[in-house]
Image: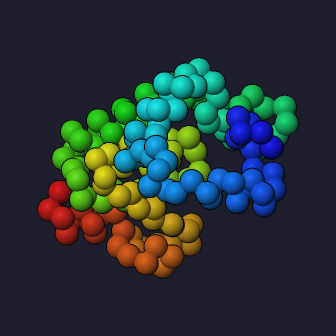
Amino acid sequence: MTASSGLIASRADVARIEQVPLAARPLVQSTYELLRQAAAEHGEREALVFVLKGSADEPPFVYSYDALLHRVTQAANLFHRLGVGAGDVVAYALPNLPQTHFVLYGARPPASPARSIRCSRQSTSSRSPRSGGEGAGDARARSGR
């Protein structure tokens, strides 16, 4: 492996990478900042490719880094307008779609955690046995929002 390829192909590559201490690496402080840097560096390159049914002949939904950042920013602005702030939790129950990524990353700034509620079709209540917690309605009522 060459230093500029960025690939990790062997244990020697891992050992070489681990020689640089984590504190010496230029790390970002948030997921949103990481997306901003990626959009600045990669712009119109493909960031998220989604194939709804998984068939080889269907056209995929493609989001560039710029488009992904735009959609995440829209979601973040929505959460801000709804009063979500630092320390608040955004719970979502969405299938694996591009919009799920917008919610997940848009709920992160400024350091607000996002929590997935795993729902099954058999569940008839707002409590999900696999979520280990309350349904989104319960959390909203408890938080006073």
Name which quarter of the figure residue 44 lies in: top right
Q: Is residue 107 visible?
A: no
Between 138 and 121, the one lying in front of the other is 138
Residue 49 sits above or below residue 21 on the image: above
Q: Residue at x 40, y 41 (%)?
A: 32
Residue positioned most to the front: 19
- Left or right for 14, reference 99: right
Residue positioned most to the right: 56
Task: Check the image and tell me how it is coloured.
Answer: rainbow
Residue 128 sits above or below residue 48 on the image: below
Quarter of the figure that contains the N terminus: top right
Q: Locate residue 99, reporting x and y percent.
A: 50, 41
Q: Locate residue 12, reporting x and y percent.
A: 78, 57
Residue positioned most to the left: 144
- Left or right for 82, reference 62: left
Between 136 and 98, the one lying in front of the other is 98
Q: Residue at x 75, y 28 (%)?
A: 59
Quarter of the figure that contains the C terminus: bottom left
**Count of numbered marks:** 0
- Left or right for 46, reference 145: right
Q: Is residue 76 visible?
A: yes
Q: Residue at x 30, y 60 (%)?
A: 89
Q: Locate residue 123, reporting x and y percent.
A: 50, 73
